Image: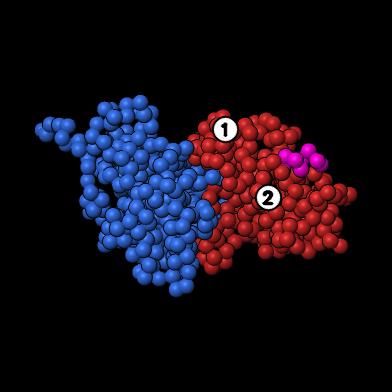
Amino acid sequence: MTQITLAELCIVAAAEAFRGNGEVIATGVGPIPRLGASLARMTHSPELMMTDGEAYLVEQPVPLGPRGYDDRKKAGHLPFSRFFDSAVWTGRRHAMVTPTQIDRFGQINLSRLGGTHEQPKTQMLGVRGFPGNTIYHPNSFFFPQHSTRVFVAGEVDMISGVGYNPARRVPGGNYTGVDLRRIITNLCVMDFGGTDHAMRVISLHPGVTFDAVQAATGFALERLDDLPETPLPDDAALAVIAAMDPHGVRAGVFRDNPPARAAA
Amino acid sequence: MTRITEGTLDKRMSAAEIVAQLSDGMTLGIGGWGPRRKPMALVREILRSDLKDLTVVAYGGADVGMLCAAGKVRKLVFAFVSLDMIPLEPWFRKAREAGAIEVLELDEGMFQWGLKAAAFGLPFLPTRVGLGTDLAVLGGLKTVTSPYADAETLIAMPALKLDAALLHVNRSDWRGNVQLFGADTYYDEWFAKAAARSYVSCEDLVDRIEDHYPDDAQAQTFERCFVTGVVEMPCGAHPSSMPPLYGWDARALKAYADAAKDPGDWSAVADRFVGADEAGYLASFGGKEAVAALSLPIF
């Protein structure tokens, strides 16, 4: 039997983030988040809504990788020209994305690293839709390389998404829409259920210790007292994953496509 | 009083005539999104001109990268600049990392909100977006307080008033009755309405659209009162995509991105990506047949 991979374990963990969300657009950016959203839609959470990655709503999630342009079956239309009124600014969406940095407040950065706003050392994409996403609808994150370069000490270089930092909240603003859910990494699953929304480890991937997670993080993490192992996918989940990723894109997410259980 | 006749509704211009109506220091909106539906033929015409000191307002792709590389941009209003298949736009990065351009960085949703404020002639529109991030301080964005019982503090997103907008559409007639197809037309209609003058290039120009395509009238996403000039530019979005006609040109985009690598001197490579004229440019990428054969991207 083929060994279950870390990628497949993370897809199942990503799917859990979308469980029971109701009729919202599930957006997964990147192979693991997208397969996670698709797995949730096709198994425990059929109420989720998804797009084809372009402008059409689909009731059958679109597989990853090359396919015929018209293979997807259109069930509705959700172009960018309607995206803010239909999905983002009405809170009817849950996005799982991969920022470049995240800090202990859940503030995220996709814009630039180092330097100044006038002259960044490294210019990245720009804030994209993160400021609006994070103040209006639930968000989760996937990080393929859990490290202190990603989970930074202090604050991120450019705050592109709202977190739980009271010092950054303009008084009088309405932050009731800020809802950071899950963080899935190559080492563990976390949420924001700690003290004052502190980041908290809620499961460790097989073979990973809490100390290893803490060592790869630039700030102190909270944890559940009895940390469970992140569950392995069952056969049904593996079958869905295989169908949604017929070209095996998931095998390229982590270097050498490691098995779900980390080597001791 | 001048009587308006059918003849005076003829908005046909050449690309050079359109660019001649633009001037140094203008605020210029560019439609499309990333590597999609970009009025690249008009952008190339700007690159062949002496126009400079522009404030460019765009959901950016190679349009922004090229204008930055050529030193045409004084200030950029943006939420991202990306070629999608090549996530980080290399020429834009170079300009930013050299500190060569001033920027107003916005969220994608705030951006369209600013266009809408401009379209409605409002000084601003309120939004929650930007609160709790660095955008407000970096962009000098002010807040307003709701005058109602909630007394909520909101960001006042300033109107993004455009002196001119450039758009590429599927069809138009000479009166500026446009038709836009494809899965998504992004915010082209709001660029058109936010601008004092909008110039439209099109894949297909017809005389009276009601005689040719009356059944497609619902594809008119903005009305002809928002169109100042029209020019027929087949393949005018290349190397960006123009659904349903053609996808983006991955090879051309990769060549353009690779050219940014050391030494990455735009003046040495501009000829390849701009050309002396549009016919020569298109021929160098295989002509209309090659562009028509570019398949639509799959996500």
Q: Outermost residue toward the top?
A: B215
Q: Which residue is mark 2?
A: A248
Magenta residues, start to end: A234-241
- How packed mark 1 is, by other alpha carbons closer than 10 Å (few <14, some 14-19, many 20 or more), is some
Judge from the rendering whether residue A201 lies leftward or rightward of residue B82; answer left or right: right
What is the quadrant of residue A121 in the picture?
bottom right
- Cα–Cα gap, marks 1 and 2: 22 Å
Q: Which chain is blue?
A: B
Judge from the rendering whether residue B187 lies leftward or rightward of residue A16; answer left or right: left
Chain letter for mark 1, please.
A
| Residue B238: numbered disc | none
Tell me the shade of chain A. Answer: red
Dot placed on the residue nearer the N-terminal end, 1 or 2: 1
Q: Outermost residue toward the left?
A: B1
Magenta run includes residue B9: no
Q: Which residue is mark 1?
A: A73
